[in-house]
Amino acid sequence: MTSPTITLAATSLRPRLSPTLVQLVGAGLSMAASSLLSLSDKTRPMALLGALPMVAAFTYLVLAQRRKPLTIEVGPEGLSIVGYQGRPIVFRPLRAEVRRWVLPSIGSRLGDALVVSGRQGTKEVKFTFVVTDGQSAPREAATSDRADFMLQAEVFRTLCSVLGALETQHSPEEPSEKSFVLVPHRGFKSALSVMLPWLGTMGVVGLIGVAGQPLLETSFGRTLIFGATLVAIALGLYFTFRRAGRPAREYLLRFTPTELALEDHGVTLLALRLSELNWHVEAYTFSSRVGSYTFPVVALSSPAGKLRVGVWDQRADFNTPGAPKGKAPQYLVGAPDFPSLLSQLRAKH
């Protein structure tokens, strides 16, 4: 007797091409095209046309980022994703693993991710299904900053159960202790750090253009300048992607019956006695060129020191009405863990 087919609802999140790849390749092609058009007096007036690849990349991302509903079918033939492309994607799952879904380039937890890999004919495929309010991934689970499809919590648990991803559960923590994973908060510095190789690439391309002016008189010189520009752009793409893929350093905030400890791989960096601990919630506003965002921050203090822990999420139920404005947090806790952190503080204080 064959197993029945299970149909689940989902929402697509990711364009078929990586958004970061599209942006960087579009920028790279624009830089290369502008450099090529600028090499000759006849084509120099058309140098602005080099921006067309970047415009095309931006248009693609705007159109592709639209979320659309789709269905997931799990049956005897394997796993089918219907509605993502023109024809259903059908593959046989070989491995399913629950990970912690984290914010790209920042590292704070957004929820849970189910990473499913398998074979579609002879081709290896991998898809990531995410949920914002899940608590299935253990603290020591690997992280994933990829998100292909969004699921509701009940659908996520069903898919995990069907694929056997939750068969090996972690042992629960001791009731006397509770811990939370933190990552450093770097704000604008984080995004700037990721883009440093690409910013350096633009500087190198500019230097090549200026230093290569004497070589523009010959065909060989123009070829040399254009080749050097392409090499610089290719290296910039490589090192930017490599830097963006580095996982954030993680710390542990651990409650014990007597203290709250900040640890770095077993080494205690700060220990605050619960009997001396004072805490309150503040509102931190992060401003950038694309807008301002307000996030809640827990300010903790005791004679031993101070600690500020925020959450990179501006949902209304996280913010305390009338909370005073505060400074930037030192660390970020995952959005699914923030309510539990507040509960622990209320229970211990």
Image (cartoon, rainbow, N blue to C red):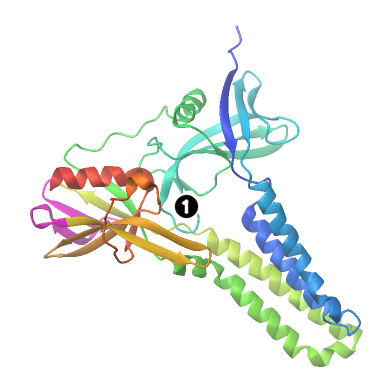
| Displayed quadrant of residue 297 | bottom left
Task: Provide the major secondary structure of the magenta segment.
Answer: strand
Residue 237 forms part of the magenta stretch: no
Residue occupying the far bottom of the picture: 214
Q: For the magenta stretch, what is the residue range?
A: 257-278
Q: Residue at x 42, y 27 (%)?
A: 167
Residue beneath label 1, please? 103
Whether residue 250 is visible, yes or no, is: no
Residue occupying the far top of the picture: 1
Q: Closer to the camera, 80 or 318?
A: 318
State the image coordinates of residue 237 (x, y, percent, origin top left).
Answer: 65, 65
Q: Residue at x 54, y 47 (%)?
A: 146
State the image coordinates of residue 258 (x, y, percent, origin top left).
Answer: 11, 50
State the image coordinates of residue 321 (x, y, percent, origin top left).
Answer: 28, 51
Query: Measured along the vertical axis of the image, is residue 9 above or below residue 67?
Result: above
Residue occupying the far front of the picture: 322
Whether residue 245 is visible, yes or no, is: yes
Disc 1: CA contacts within 10 A as few (<14), some (14-19) or many (>=20)? some
Query: Measured along the vertical axis of the image, is residue 278 above or below residue 221?
Result: above
Answer with left or right where residue 245 lies relative to residue 209.
Answer: left
Q: Residue at x 85, y 80 (%)?
A: 45
Query: Measured along the vertical axis of the image, is residue 166 above or below residue 105?
Result: above
Image quarter hosting the N terminus: top right
Answer with left or right where residue 51 lies relative to residue 23.
Answer: right
Query: Measured along the vertical axis of the image, is residue 223 above or below residue 7?
Result: below
Q: Label 1 sits on what residue type?
A: Leu
State the image coordinates of residue 183 (x, y, percent, origin top left).
Answer: 37, 57
Q: Secondary structure under badge 1?
A: loop
Residue 274 forms part of the magenta stretch: yes
